[in-house]
Amino acid sequence: MPKHTAPVDEPNASLAPLVIVGVLPPIEGGEDNLLPKDAWLNPLRVTFELWSDHSTRPGAFDRVQLIWDGDEGKPIDEKQFDGPYTEEDLADLWLEVPACKLSEGGHTIFYKVWSWNQSPIPRVTEPVNVTIDKSPPVLAGDRKMAFPEAVVPPYKITAQYLSDPANSDQVLATLPDYAVKKVGDVISWYWEEFPNSQHLVDSLTLDPGNVGQPLHLPLKGDMLRERGNGLRYATCRVRDRVGHEVTTLHVLLDVNILPPPLRKRPSVKEATGAVLDPLFYGVSGVTVVIPRQDDEDLGLKREVFWRGYGELGSHHALEPNPANPREYPIPPAAIVPNIGAGRVAAITYRVEGDTKESDPLRLTVSTIPASKYSQIDCPQAARGNPLKLSRSAVSPEGTGLTLAAWVYQAPTQYINIWLTSASLPDEPIRTAWPVVRGINRATLPKTYLERLPLNAVLAVHVSVSFDGGDSYLPFLSLDIQVLA
């Protein structure tokens, strides 16, 4: 190398540390400058900054040497740089370790700078560690996750196991030990219907606190219930920080933690979907139809539950239609109390041997318009609109009112009848009066008529309770004009 006698501007100037290209980012407790998987197949490049006392004259050379594993007698790579430096020279401030030198294990690397002034002592950077890990983790034993003794054998997970307070609503699977656990390894475990390690449960990155401990991987109850009953495969994948992966052999477990699905909901033959019009389809009762079952031919007994408004609006059907064993009749008496705004009957069935009833049909029973019920009448009044009633012709006891039978009439019902007019307070005639079958009768008092001015119009109102007095449905009212 040509000699030059110019003085060194900064003979003791320090060198910037080298930068190793492509190593993994550092983590606490992890290996220094760890190469990712397969990076050792290519030369390892390092870069460095231009030192402060570099050559500034043509023909004056600086020399940089890269030292691998402390072998200063055999630099692994070197370059000469002739001053003054150009942008192209600055882009060339790098050296490489050949791929053939990148053996597994720990190495050191540093660089020297021999100054252009031929100083016999080079400046040297501090050595930097480099780690190369070419070996994937090796699972011990049978390479399978281990499960608690209460689960194996026969490799079953039950609702009883999860409900035991000692198990905290989870199953702890233990990862087989492997060589060598290191900080930064990622443990991922899977629970799925096929052993393809795609349906992730969770993952864990090892840190200094757990790298030396047995690894218990939780299969929580919520996850198990969400993924359902049946045969399930448990696998675990270990991915080290470098990128090597190894997967455990799968463990097949039988999961029985969810109750069997409810049987399909019934239907009502006379309903339109989940709505029943009781005026046209229900006067003679309705028919609950049980859908065809897989165990239809076993001769299992069945029962139907019609749960409506209160005791009056409910019915327990034990016997099917003799002509069709899947049809169960519901009497009209169980329909009537459900006739009202927003009332819903829940209809289920149970098959012999089942612990639970079927999925319910929630049936809305429509109201019946007041115009569809009977209208109260005053037979003594002359026909017209309004009716005409001669006060002088009414006996001192009053005149009769009659209400003809109406649809769904029953002695379990109650009736209200009252009078209204513009000039008098409301006058009750019947209040929560038990209904009789056929014509219901009441009396319009003459004393009430006498308090009305001539030609005044009074209204006779009627409401009937179909649900034992809890609520009343309006019937049509009747207008009567009072004459002399």
Image (spheres, helix red, strand yellow):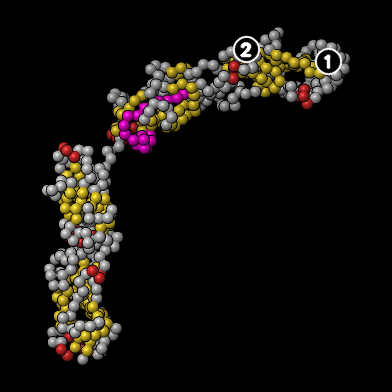
Q: Is residue 31 visible?
A: no
Relative horizontal placement of residue 118, taking residue 384 as reference (left or right): right
Q: Position of residue 458 (x, y in %)?
A: 25, 82
Query: Please, is residue 444 above or below residue 17 in the view?
Result: below
Q: Quadrant of the C terminus?
A: bottom left
Provide the residue designation for mark 1: 117
Q: Nearer the viewer, mark 1 or mark 2?
A: 2
| Residue at x-position 45% and y-position 28% | 188
Query: Residue 77 sits in which quadrant?
Result: top right
Please, what is the three-letter code of the amino acid marked with disc 2?
Answer: Lys
Check disc 1 and report its element: helix, strand or loop: loop
Q: Position of residue 187 (x, y in %)?
A: 46, 26
479 to 316, vertically: above or below = below
Amino acid type, callout 1: Asn
- Magenta stretch, residue numbers: 220-238
Placement of the N terminus among the 4 image quadrants: top right
Does the magenta segment cover residue 125?
A: no
Where residue 139 appears, x then y in whole percent? 43, 18
Q: Residues within 10 Å of mark 1 (few under 14, many from 20)?
A: some
| Front residue of 443 and 28 | 443
Residue 19 visible (yes or no): yes
The answer to whether residue 231 is magenta is: yes
For disc 2, the neighbor class at 10 Å (few under 14, some 14 to 19, many from 20) is few
Q: Is residue 99 left or right of residue 402?
A: right
Residue farthest along the top direction in this orientation: 73
Q: Which disc number belongs to residue 237?
A: none
Quarter occupied by residue 215: top left
Q: Is residue 92 left or right of residue 355?
A: right
The one of 457 and 26 positioned closer to us in this rendering: 457
Seen at 83% across and 15% down, the residue is 117
In the picture of the structure, the residue carrying the numbered disc 2 is 101
